[in-house]
């Protein structure tokens, strides 16, 4: 097990996990989830405006069909409830320009805030020193930048998910068109092909995120690998969300709130995924915590092009010596405690040499630490 834990890739994952937790990855993920749900309101307004434009301008015949369908569902409603409700719906649909404008403006504002929070969270995971203040322009320029990133991100999302959806929906049609529908195993092949295309589309999305959002320049190879890891995880997350949604819809009681719960859960896990992969990419050549020693950082001592906070290794070495002292002190206190309570606790048989050995280790740890400090002072 120790050999497995010392493997470079395992230590890399441990560094990423340590950084993710140390730099409030879960808290940032919760904040991104909140702004994601908040941004859905103007998006739904804009979608309603598009529906209104379609039903009142492009295809007015469909409005009558919709009204007839709603009227059929309201048969037996008391008084003129049905007529009033139909009038409200028709009036709202006809006011689609105002709703659309408000929706677009609100979506740009909320979306800009969402991008700003996502950008800050990713930068918190990727810069060498968490305490370093994030570089920002004035509020006007920063807002315009965030809105520009939002537009590019929306285009990237539409393109990538459009490719994935087209691959999924058109695969069977193309197979039938070229006469391959009778080939043994073609169904499995087409499903695998759609999954591969979905992963490729997600890879492009994550590649865009980790290219545009970080403040520090990240290792290109790790960005590409990290984007692939994020893409595969996103496909699995979408599959899980589909299963949960289907399960909720089968239960009439859960169908009301189930989809909302799934959406919030998806947003939260997706946000955490983005941040954890960002931490993994960054810790390829960065220690987990600035100026602190962590055992998974050891491979970086021998690596080239390591990106650290100022005076990281000297502070980390001092922290390591202090950790060894604390560990020796804890062992000594444990041995002393066991020796004190041996007459009170039945069956407790402490090692007679354990306390003395622990004291010697604690003393030696302090001597080694002091010796190293003197060497460091002479070196300066």
Image (cartoon, rainbow, N blue to C red):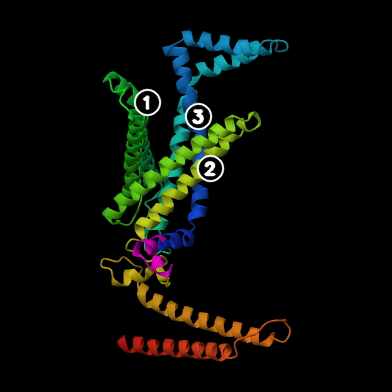
Q: Earlier in the sequence, mark 2 or mark 3?
A: 3
- Which mark sits nearer the N-terminus, 3 or 1? 3
Q: Badge 2 local density, few (<14 within 10 Å), some, or many (20+)?
A: some
Secondary structure at badge 2 equals helix
- Tell me the residue that label 3 is attached to: 44
Taking depth in this image into account, of 242 and 257 the one nearest to the observer is: 242
Q: Of 109 and 308, which appears nearest the observer? A: 308
Label 2 and label 1: CA atoms lie apart by 26 Å
Nearer the camera: disc 2 or disc 3: 2
Label 1, on which residue?
A: 169
Q: Nearer the viewer, residue 151 or 295?
A: 295
Mark 1 neighbour class, 10 Å CA radius: few under 14, some 14 to 19, many 20 or more: few
Q: Residue at x 42, y 62 (%)?
A: 14
Q: Residue 190, image x and y in percent?
A: 34, 30
Q: Nearer the viewer, mark 2 or mark 1?
A: 1
Per the image, the residue denoted by label 2 is 265
Name the element at disc 3: helix
Give percent across and percent down for residue 214. Answer: 35, 53
Tell me if residue 246 comes above or below residue 115 in the rendering. Answer: above
């Amino acid at each position: 097990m120790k050999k497995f834990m010392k493997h470079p890739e395992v230590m890399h994952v441990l560094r990423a996990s340590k950084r993710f937790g140390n730099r409030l990855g879960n808290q940032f993920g919760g904040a991104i989830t909140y702004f994601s749900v908040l941004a859905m309101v103007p998006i739904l307004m804009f979608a309603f405006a598009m529906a209104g434009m379609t039903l009142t301008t492009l295809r007015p015949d469909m409005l009558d069909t919709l009204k007839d369908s709603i009227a059929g569902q309201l048969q037996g409603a008391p008084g003129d409830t049905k007529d009033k409700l139909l009038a409200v719906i028709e009036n709202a649909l006809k006011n689609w320009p105002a709703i659309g404008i408000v929706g677009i403006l609100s979506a740009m504002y909320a979306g800009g805030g969402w991008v700003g929070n996502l950008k800050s969270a990713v930068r918190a995971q990727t810069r060498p020193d968490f305490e370093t203040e994030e570089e920002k322009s004035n509020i006007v320029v920063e807002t315009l930048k965030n809105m520009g990133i939002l537009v590019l991100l929306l285009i990237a999302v539409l393109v990538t998910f459009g490719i994935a959806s087209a691959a999924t929906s058109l695969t069977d049609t193309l197979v039938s068109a070229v006469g391959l529908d009778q080939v043994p195993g073609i169904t499995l092949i087409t499903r695998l092909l759609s999954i591969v295309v979905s992963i490729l589309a997600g890879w492009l999305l994550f590649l865009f995120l980790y290219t545009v959002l970080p403040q520090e320049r990240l290792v290109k190879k790790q960005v590409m690998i990290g984007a692939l890891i994020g893409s595969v995880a996103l496909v699995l997350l979408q599959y899980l969300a589909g299963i949960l949604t289907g399960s909720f819809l089968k239960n009439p009681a859960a169908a009301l709130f189930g989809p909302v719960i799934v959406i919030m859960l998806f947003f939260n896990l997706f946000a955490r995924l983005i941040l954890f992969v960002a931490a993994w990419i960054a810790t390829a050549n960065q220690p987990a915590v600035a100026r602190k020693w962590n055992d998974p950082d050891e491979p970086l001592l021998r690596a080239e092009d390591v990106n650290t906070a100022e005076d990281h290794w000297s502070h980390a070495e001092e922290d390591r010596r202090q950790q060894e002292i604390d560990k020796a002190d804890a062992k000594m206190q444990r041995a002393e405690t066991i020796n004190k309570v041996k007459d009170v606790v039945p069956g407790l048989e402490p090692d007679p040499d354990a306390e003395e050995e622990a004291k010697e280790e604690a003393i030696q740890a302090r001597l080694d630490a002091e010796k190293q400090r003197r060497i460091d002072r002479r070196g300066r």
